[in-house]
Image: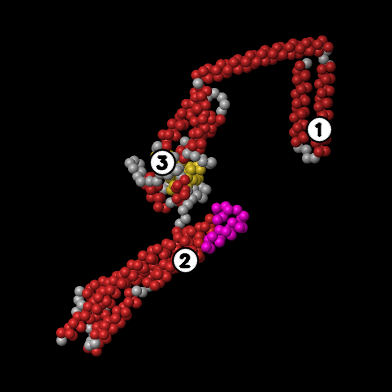
Amino acid sequence: MSNRILKICSGLVLMSTMAMGSLSSAQTLDDVLAEARSVREAAQALFQQRVAEFNATPAAEQQRLIQQAAVARTAIAATVQEKTNTFSANDLEISRLATELRDKANALGLSEVFGLARQIAGDTTTILEQSLINAQFNDGRVAFLREFAEANTMASVEELERVAFELQQEIVASGQVARFAGTVVEANGETLNTNVVRIGPFTAVADGKYLAYIPSLNRLNVMPRQPEELLPNAVALEAATSGYVQTIVDSTRGVLLGMFVERPTIEERIEQGESVGLIIIVVGALALIAFVYQLIYLILARVAVTKQMRNLQNPTKDNALGRVLLAFKGDGSKIEQDSEVAELRISEAVMREVPGLERFQPFLRLAVAAGPLLGLVGTVVGMIITFQSITESGSSDPKLMAGGIGQAMIATVLGLGVAVPLLFAGALLNSLSRSIVQILDEQSTGMLADNIEKRKHV
């Protein structure tokens, strides 16, 4: 009889399973209703079949099966009650032991120890999340410390030992220069398995390039912009196997290096200055070319004049002093008997040499004056752009104002950067030209005095 009852139950379960499978394939509400009706009819038919089989059993057999089921039910109920009593007793014992353990822990001061351990773990988690060392020891230590710090249960010996181990590992690794195999993400997004050299939690390099640690992704990325002047240090660090090498250690754990590589290049700074900056650069370049040309000319002229001073009796036309002396001591048709006429002739010769000696100096003075003025124009234009961005956006976001402020500052810097060097350059040219003119005046005046003195003795 019990077998028949089990068959009835299994048949109902089977019909329910079939019903769920068929209902899942229905497309409309009418289909669902029709399938539910058919399943119910099938279940009722099966139930009637099972009832008929039970009723066909003799009464004595039915009574025996009912009594047998009642005995089994009583035994099962007794077992359930026994297990329930055991569970309740165990629960009470666990509560009593937990209270006893907590009292003993408080008596020994362990609660303070555990609280301090969790506090240290919580503080350390924040540091380790940003630590470059995670790229080498990616063993879930941050997740463990976070769970340990947030847990409310009593810490086990194993947990305390691991907390101490993780702290010790971070301390030791912070003072090491380590080489390990790691995964590096290139600037184009390509993942590369390569050897990484790490200096504590400060700097990491791979394949001659500096790496940046991304805490949220727990990975090393090649910095999109590399400090070109510092790349030889990265190569030397990778190539070293022992001893000491000169390299870069960023004490801010990548912040300073990131700021360093984000500095605008010369081309980018010029672009920030826009048209006014280009005009300043063009003026400065022209003034520089003029300065170099005139400087070379004056140096050669000074050398030639110095050479002529060693041989005043034989003046030549390849230098300024020689041409001045020839104007006074030329051929017979140019010899002046009147001292006043000779003096005028000498002054004319000196004045003829002055324009060549003072060439480009007015242009340099103009460039010195125009540089700051052009820079001021660029500053005004940049501030206008800044105010326009504030008006259009309705906010004072620094990123929106960066372009205008950059143009304003760069134009000022370019103007001063052109004016200050040209100021010294103009002073140098003026000093050289005046020294040569002074030599011409001294020598010509001295020769005129000698000539007048000789004429008095005649």
Decide which of 269, 72 is in the foreground and name it: 269
Residue of label 2: 373
Q: Is residue 390 magenta?
A: yes
Q: CA distance from mark 2 to mark 1?
A: 92 Å
**Mark 3 touches mark 1? (CB < 8 Å):** no
Residue of label 3: 199
Residue ranking furthest to the front:
456
Q: Considering the image in quadrants, where does the C terminus appear? A: bottom left
Three-letter code, disc 2: Leu
Q: Residue at x 29, y 81 (%)?
A: 347
Q: CA distance from mark 2 to mark 3?
A: 49 Å
Please say if 95 is above or below 117.
above
Three-letter code, disc 3: Ile
Percent across and percent down for residue 258 are 47, 48
Q: Residue at x 18, y 82 (%)?
A: 453
Q: Which residues are magenta?
A: 380-401
Mark found first going from the N terminus, 2 or 1: 1
Question: Circle 1 — which element?
Answer: helix
Density class for disc 3 (Cα within 10 Å; few <14, some 14-19, many ≥20) is: many
**Mark 2 touches mark 3? (CB < 8 Å):** no
Density class for disc 1 (Cα within 10 Å; few <14, some 14-19, many ≥20) is: some
Relative horizontal placement of residue 36, taking residue 174 as reference (left or right): right
Q: What is the number of the mark on residue 143? A: none
